[in-house]
Structures are given as structure tokens and as C-alpha cells.
Amino acid sequence: MGSQSWQVRVSAHGVGSGFLMTDRHVMTCAHIVDGAERAEVTFAQYPDLGPLEASVIVGGGWNGADQGRGDVAVLELDRPVGVPPARFAPVDASYAHPAAKLTAYGFPRGYDEGILGEFRSTSDQLIAGEWLQLEAWTSHGSPLEEGFSGAAVVREDTGEVVGMVTARYSAGGGGRMLPSRALVRYWADAAELVPVPEHSPGMVVRLRDLVQRYADDCTPEDVYRSVMEPLTPLPPLPPAGGFLSLWDVAWFLLTEVDPIPGTAPWADFAAYLADRAQDAAVRRALYAWAGDQRSGTTRQRPETRLVPDGVTKWSPILVEIERSGAERDAYLVSVYAIRDGRAQLVASDTLARQHMQEYVRERLDHAFRQIDRSGDELIAFALPRDWLGEPVDEWHAGVDDATPLGCSSPVVVMDLARRRESRLQFKLEKVWQKLDGRSDSDWHLVECGSSEDPAKLTVRLKGLETAVGYGSPPESDQARGLLQAGLNAAAPVIVWPRSGCSSRHDGDSTAEHSCTGSRFLDALKGRLASLPLANLPLYVRDLRSEAYLNEEPHWAADLALIWEDPRWFPAASIYSQSPVG
């Protein structure tokens, strides 16, 4: 058979088999070269090449025991050879059911030129999480014996390698093999040689190279749990004996985990490492890799939402900020790109408040890689209720761009508690369905210093497709109660000035009509009442730019905007605790 050309005989402390992986690298068993720094390699089909010298460059961590793990070694020839290397079957190739004839080329005592044996895989079941069992193809065929260790196990029908012989049984003519996916665990350079369905070799190699450049301390098991637990309460168990390295985690996610439709745990893995990478170039490359994977997924995409004529099609980015139980000043910050009706996690970490702006700025850049280019960007902050007045629209737009974020992109705020309450989300969707056909908007204005009962305001607003404008910020208990009334009434849009009114009213109607709060409400209704609420984030962006450029005080200079259409913001994955806790 033609594949015999890349089969080799390996001599060091013992004699065994091996196979050419590249024009210069040979794989064999660690127990063949145990303790040796050099080995001799002979190509059975090319005697004119003569014995070649090679250095032992990789060991799989084999401990010398007959049943020890990692019985893998890689030899580097002193010079490249012009022999075509082995070709691997896809990592998920089935050869046990129905049984495919497998061959191995060994060098038992008395057979210096080698001998071919025929075998089958007893089952797909891994033994001790690593080996597969081999048995003789026929009762009168050549058994596995000393000299077969390190031989490539080859499908006879395709000539593709599916694994490597590592041990023989003392009786029955069978033995054990390491499947190709296990070989890649011990030698990451083989990742580009073993095809992984649905993942191109270039993509796998890029991730491997980035993981190998990742120099920060991470425990592989902790990384795996942090990636998988938000996706499923019962993630697949890690390999028996635990993960060997971060690369082993990546390879396991690519080859062993059957993802939930719409998820890409390998992309979440890359984003997790990116969040913790100290090297800026590695961090950017990991984020880019994760973004490419998420934008390229095609699993069960929901139908694209139909947008009525004259209504903006949004490509949202969602930033969720919630308090973490880790420390008093700890917040869980999660950034999502909303695409095709799904919230795709870009990054998530637990941070102190002073580090939040810098973290969000950089992650927004990576989120822009993943949103739909056919829509208008919309950056939404889902915040705790006592944060709703936080001037997130005044945060800098970029690391090297001091432009206010709200002047660069439409920026809105959502109440995190309301976002997670199904009853109010249902009511909001109903309101927006009625607003879809409106070319203007109604506004209910709550005057500065209003003493209205908040519960009565909630009832008054229910069932109205109206925006709510407040003349003063929610700084007093009464003002906070009135703001909550608007939230409880499922008002789709709520606006107020973040700066307070300097006038004291005390029943003085003249003061009420001349205060800054009243002037704010007058300007609000005069400028925005003729506009559809669906497009309001764009108009507010323009207003914020106008106020920023204006040398004189401007009524919209500190405008706070709650705008929430749940149809653009599907439920994101909500962590019960910090994913790095």
C-alpha cells in the first residue's frame, strides 16, 4: 500500500515503529526513546536514504509505567526528507461501527524490513479516557507484538491515519492505540494536520498560536468551567486525568463538546483569555478570533426581524452592569453583540468602578466586529436602578478618542431590573407593536417638584403608548418614586435632565413655569413630539452633539434617556455569579 512510504523504523533504547508527520518530524511512542536525546530513523520503503539521525524534541509526559498516559514522542530529523508525510482522517471519523479494516506497520524481532498487521477497533469507547482497544482482524492474522509500538493505525480503505499503536496485550493478539485527537493533545503542532469538521485548519492554527503566546497564569480547569457553566448547568466532563494545558482546553472544546445551538464555546474561550491577556497584541487577536467565530456561525439562526418603513433598523450592542457579590465595589460587566436575534457574549469580567470605562471602551471596539453591518449601531447600557442617571453617554468614545460616546453613537439606558421582569417585557413589546405605525409621539410630562402619588401615576400611564418626561432628576424619594412609576407602567421612553432645578417652588406657580425643569420639558416636547419614538436614539445623538458644540448652556447638555424596545434586545445569558468568582 502507498501509505507504507511514510512508515519508519525507530531505534534508540528500544526498537519500534513511527510515521512521518511533516517533512522533518516523526511521531513514535515515548517508551521507544525513553531517556534518549537522539534516535535513528530508517525508511523501510526508501533504503537508499540510509539511517537518519533525529533529536527527541517532545515527550508526552509518560511516566515509564506500562499503562502510563502520554506515551507520545516527536523526533526532529537533522534534515528534511522528500517523502510525502502521513495524511490524517477527520478527527470524528468513524471506524468502529461498522468496523473498518485498520492496518499497522511494525518491526518485530527478525523483521527489519517491517511487517503489516490487520486490526479493528473494538469500540469507540475510550479506556481511561485516552486509549482505544485494538483486536486482530482475523484469528490467523499477525498479532500486535513488540516492534509495533509507535506504528500509525491506518484505515485501509482511505489510507488515512486514525491513531498510533502504544501497547500490545500479552494474549489475544490485540492491544491499544491512541486516537489522533489524543495525539494532538500532546503535540499541538499536529493540530493543523488533523481535520476538524466545521473548523478550517487555518482557524485552528490561529487559535493554537494565540494560546501558545498567552503568557498569563490560568488554571485550565478553571477556564473550562468559567466558559461552559454559563452555557449549560451540566457541561461535559474534562478528560480523565484533567487538562494538560490551555491548548488542551481549546482542543477539547473544538473536538469533544457538542455545543448548544447558537453557541460557540470555543469563541467564549478565546474571549475569556482575551479579557485576561496582559499583552495588548494577543488580547486584540483573541478578540478578533472570537468575533470571527461568532459572526460566522450558522446554527439555527432565527428569522431576521422585519422593520416597518421609516423605522430605523438597529444593530445593537448591549452593556450590562450589575453588582457582584465578590466585593463591595465589584461589578460584573458584560458586553454583548446583538446579531440575528441572539445576544453573543463578547467579554465579561468583574471590575471595580474606576476600571469600568476603560474596560467597556476596548470591548465596544470588539463588539463592533460582530454586529450586522446593514443596520445603525445602538449602544445600550442595562444598569442597576440607582445607576440610571450615570452619564454613560459622556464616557469617551475610544482609548484615543475623547469624543463623548453619546455624540459618536446613539446611546440609551435600560433599567436592568425591568429588563429581567417578564411581565414588563411583555407589556413593552405590546406598546412597541402599537407604536410601529406612528410617525409622531405623545409625551406625558411630569413637572419639576410634582407631588403626585407614584402609584396613581403608574395607573394613569398604563395602556398609553406615550413617552414620559420628568422635569427634575430622581434625587429625592418622591422623584425616585415617580421615575419608578414610569418604569412600572412599561413606558417605552423616559427622559429627564441629570442636573437638578435650582428654584424652590413651594407652590409658586410663577417659579414652576420659569424653572430650568419646566424649560427642559418645554424644549423636550417642542423638539421631540413630532418624531417617532422608534428613531429617537438617533435624534438624541444629534441633540447631544448640538449641545456639546454649543458655547452657551443647552437644555439637552445633560439629557438622560431610557429607551427600551425588547424586540431588539433578546435575553442575554445571565450569570448567577461572576464567571471568574
Image (cartoon, rainbow, N blue to C red):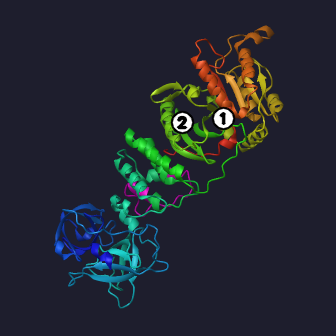
Kind of residue at disc 2: Tyr
Instruction: Measure the alpha-carbon separation of dots 1 and 2.
Output: 16 Å
Q: Residues within 10 Å of mark 2 (few under 14, many from 20)?
A: many
**Which residue: 32% across, 75% down?**
3
Query: Dot 1: few (<14), some (14–19), or many (≥20) neighbours within 10 Å?
Result: many
Q: Residue 217, how many percent across, how many down? A: 37, 46
Mark nearer the N terminus (1 vs 2)? 2
Pick the residue in front: 71 or 371. 371
* Number of the label disc, if any, that sits on residue 331: 2
List the residue tagged with mark 1. Answer: 415
**Label at residue 461:** none
- Tell me where the magenta segment starts and ends, as one range: 226-251
Is 230 within the magenta?
yes
Instruction: Name the residue type under label 1.
Output: Asp
- Residue 543 visible here: yes
Residue 502 part of the magenta segment:
no
Of the residues tagged 1 and 2, which is closer to the observer?
1
Which sits in the foreground, 26 or 295?
Answer: 295
